Image (cartoon, rainbow, N blue to C red):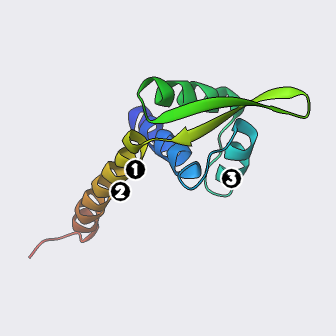
Amino acid sequence: MDAQLKKGLLDVCVLAAIRKEESYGYKIISDLAPYIEISESTLYPILRRLESGGAVKTRCSEHNGRLRRYFRITQVGLKRIDEFIETMEQFKVISDFIAQGDRK
């Protein structure tokens, strides 16, 4: 898979994982596990990139004596999901055309 396409796909998958409620790293990885494999070393740079782009906001809270960082989606992140879905719908139309084979 093209590296840029995969990068964009992973970003949107992470956004989708926190769309309904805020979450933290390990839970995001667990929520994505049935759909796509992602490691901590991949997730945290994605979250930093999404945060710097305004797609997520963070807060820290103590959990079992340790600080846990929680991530929540912003309007920018929701818009990014919508744009991704629209792009994938366009790709589907093109893919269906290509898969038809011979045109009449």
- Dot 3: what SS? helix
Residue 28 - label? none
What numbered label is drawn on residue 81? 1
Q: Residue 31: which disc?
A: 3
Residue at 44% of width from left, 36% of height from top? Answer: 55
Q: Which residue is mark 2?
A: 85
The residues bearing labels 1 and 2 have C-alpha atoms spaced at a distance of 6 Å
The residue under the point 54% across, 24% down is 48
* Left or right placement of residue 97 versus residue 5 in this view: left
Q: Along the line of sight, which residue is nearer the eye, 100 or 4?
A: 4
Pointers 1 and 2 in contact (C-beta within 8 Å): yes
Please state, as top left, top right, bottom left or bottom right, where the N terminus lies in the image.
top left
Label 2, residues with CA under 10 Å away: few <14, some 14-19, many ≥20: few
Q: Is residue 43 left or right of residue 100?
A: right
Mark 3–mark 2 distance (CA, rounded to whole Å): 20 Å
Asked if labels 2 and 3 touch by Cβ distance under 8 angstroms, the answer is no
Q: Name the quadrant of the C terminus.
A: bottom left
Residue drawn 39% across and 44% down? 75
- Name the kind of residue labelled 3 in the image: Asp
Q: Amino acid at mark 1?
A: Ile
Q: Secondary structure at mark 1?
A: helix
Q: Earlier in the sequence, mark 3 or mark 2?
A: 3
Describe the element under mark 2 as helix, strand or loop.
Answer: helix
Asked whether, in this view, residue 49 is left or right of residue 76, the answer is right
Relative depth, front residue between 77 and 93: 77
**On screen, 81 above or below 94?**
above
Q: Earlier in the sequence, mark 1 or mark 3?
A: 3
Q: Are marks 1 and 3 in contact (CB under 8 Å)?
A: no
Q: Percent from the top left, x then y, of residue 69?
A: 70, 30
x%, y% of residue 21?
A: 61, 52
* Circle 2: residue type: Ile
| 54 vs 50, nearest the viewer | 54
